[in-house]
C-alpha cells in the first residue's frame, strides 16, 4: 500500500477466501512487502506467501484442508524476518518457507509487548513470548474476555498510546467496561508512533470495520531492523 494507491485492484491469485492474511515486510531479503495467507478451500494450497505488489507466489504448503488460522510475523530472532505458521501445517516456517521446528502455542493475534522488536503472541486474554523450546507467558488478563470464539480476538490491539509497543483492549467479563492494557517493559528501540504509518493506521481501522486481524506497519519491525523511517506529516 502506498500513499499513491488509488484503490483499484492490483492482482488476484484466484485462490479464493481465507480466514487470515498478513501483509508486511515479512521477508527483509526481498524488496517491498510480502503477503501470507491461508486457504479455506481444501483444493487450494494450505498457505502461501506472495509478493504483495505483483501477487507472484513465492512458496506454498500442501493442499487438503480448510486451514482455519495462520499468522506471519517476526516472532523469533533465530531466523531473519517473519516466521509463518498455520493450523494445518506441522512446522514453523521461515520467511522463505523452510521448516524451523516447533510451532507457537497460538495462531491468532500479535503484540509488540516487551522491550525487544521481535513480536509477541496475543491469544485470548494472554500475551506469550515464543521460544524454540517453549513459550513464556508475559501477561494474563484478569476479569476480561475475548471475542469471536476460537479466533479469540481482542476488542482492539495496536499502538494507541505512548511509544510503539502495542496496547490491547479487552472487555470485562461482565461487559460493563473496556480495559486498556499497556506494557510495563522499557525499551531502547525508538520508533515514531505507529499510527503515523498509513498502512498500520488502516489496519487499526479494519479491526473494527472488517475482518478482525492483527495490524502490520509498512516497514520491518524485528530483530536486526534498520532505523525505522520517520513519517512525513502534512497538515492542511
Ligand atoms: Ca520484503
Ligand atoms: Ca524471525
Ligand atoms: Ca518483543
Ligand atoms: Ca503504545
Image (cartoon, rainbow, N blue to C red):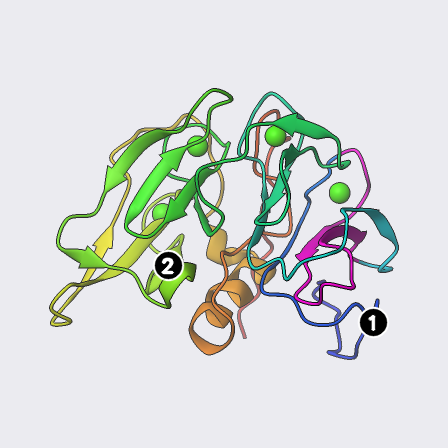
* Camera-nearest residue between 41 and 154: 41
- Judged left or right of residue 56, residue 125 is left
Disc 2 to disc 1, how far (Cα)? 28 Å
Would you say residue 39 sits in the magenta stretch? yes
- Judged left or right of residue 146, residue 213 is right
Q: Secondary structure at mark 2?
A: loop
Residue 193, position in %: x, y?
A: 45, 49
Up/down of 157 relative to 9, above or below: above
Q: Residue at image x 47%, y 78%?
A: 209
Dot label at residue 152: 2
Q: Quadrant of the C terminus?
A: bottom right
Q: Quadrant of residue 145?
A: bottom left
Q: Quadrant of residue 223?
A: top right
Q: Which residues are magenta?
A: 29-52
Up/down of 200 relative to 192, above or below: below
Q: Residue at image x 83%, y 70%?
A: 12
Question: Which residue in the structure is indicated by mark 1?
Answer: 14
Residue 98, position in %: x, y?
A: 75, 31
Amino acid at each position: 500500500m502506498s500513499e499513491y494507491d488509488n484503490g483499484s485492484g492490483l492482482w488476484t491469485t484466484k485462490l479464493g477466501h481465507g480466514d487470515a492474511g498478513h501483509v508486511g515486510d515479512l521477508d527483509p531479503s526481498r524488496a517491498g512487502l510480502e503477503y501470507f495467507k491461508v486457504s479455506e478451500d481444501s483444493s487450494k494450497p494450505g498457505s502461501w506467501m506472495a509478493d504483495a505488489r505483483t501477487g507472484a507466489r513465492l512458496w506454498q504448503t500442501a493442499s487438503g484442508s480448510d486451514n482455519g488460522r495462520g499468522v506471519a510475523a517476526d516472532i523469533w530472532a533465530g531466523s531473519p524476518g517473519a516466521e509463518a505458521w498455520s493450523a494445518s501445517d506441522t512446522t514453523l516456517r521461515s520467511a522463505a518457507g523452510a521448516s524451523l521446528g516447533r510451532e507457537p502455542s497460538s495462531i491468532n493475534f500479535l503484540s509488540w509487548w516487551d522491550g525487544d522488536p521481535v513480536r509477541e503472541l496475543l491469544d485470548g486474554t494472554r500475551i506469550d513470548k515464543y521460544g524454540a523450546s517453549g513459550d513464556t507467558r508475559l501477561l494474563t488478563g484478569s476479569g476480561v474476555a475475548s471475542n469471536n470464539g476460537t479466533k479469540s480476538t481482542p476488542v482492539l490491539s495496536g499502538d494507541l498510546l505512548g511509544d510503539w509497543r502495542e496496547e490491547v483492549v479487552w472487555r470485562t467479563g461482565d461487559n460493563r467496561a473496556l480495559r486498556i492494557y499497556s506494557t510495563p517493559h522499557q525499551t531502547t528501540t525508538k520508533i515514531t508512533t505507529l499510527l503515523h504509518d498509513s498502512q498500520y493506521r488502516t489496519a487499526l481501522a479494519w479491526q473494527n470495520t472488517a475482518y478482525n486481524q492483527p495490524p502490520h506497519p509498512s516497514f520491518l519491525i524485528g530483530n536486526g531492523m534498520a532505523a525505522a523511517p520517520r513519517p512525513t506529516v502534512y497538515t492542511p
